[in-house]
Amino acid sequence: MHPESHLILHHARAAELHAATRARRQAADAGRAGELRARLGWTLVEVGLRLATAPQPALAHA
């Protein structure tokens, strides 16, 4: 094989690897953002439920 053909194949493979790495990083970043969004959402649900339920009056002991 000619050196130029090796170089062309190397550049093509490097571009594929860079694209795959970029896609994985974007997926990981989206996953972290989604995890944070879910955690925040459930925290807001918990706070809303606490606010929505009326506190029960304490029972007096006889």
Image (tube, rainbow, N blue to C red):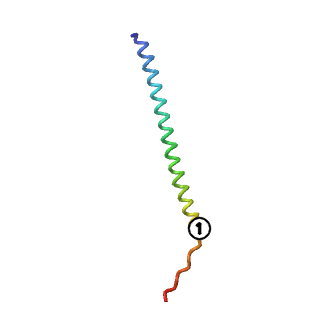
Q: Position of residue 4 (x, y in %)?
A: 43, 12
Q: Position of residue 6 (x, y in %)?
A: 41, 15
Q: Residue at 39% x, 10% y: name it.
A: 1
The answer to which quarter of the image holds residue 52 is bottom right
Up the image or down, 5 lies above or below 56; here it is: above
Q: Residue at 45% x, 21% y: name it.
A: 11
Furthest-front residue in this view: 62
Up the image or down, 52 lies above or below 56; here it is: above
* Total marks in image: 1
Q: Position of residue 48 (x, y in %)?
A: 58, 63
Q: Secondary structure at mark 1?
A: helix
Q: Amino acid at mark 1?
A: Leu
Task: Using a 10 Å C-alpha cutoff, classify the residue at mark 1 as few (fewer than 14 neighbours), some (14 to 19) or many (20 or more).
Answer: few
Up the image or down, 2 lies above or below 54; here it is: above
Q: Residue at 53% x, 47% y: name it.
A: 34
Q: Position of residue 26 (x, y in %)?
A: 51, 38
Furthest-top residue in this view: 2
- Horizontally, is 13 left or right of 38 in the view? left
Q: Residue at 46% x, 21% y: name it.
A: 12
Residue highlighted by disc 1 = 51
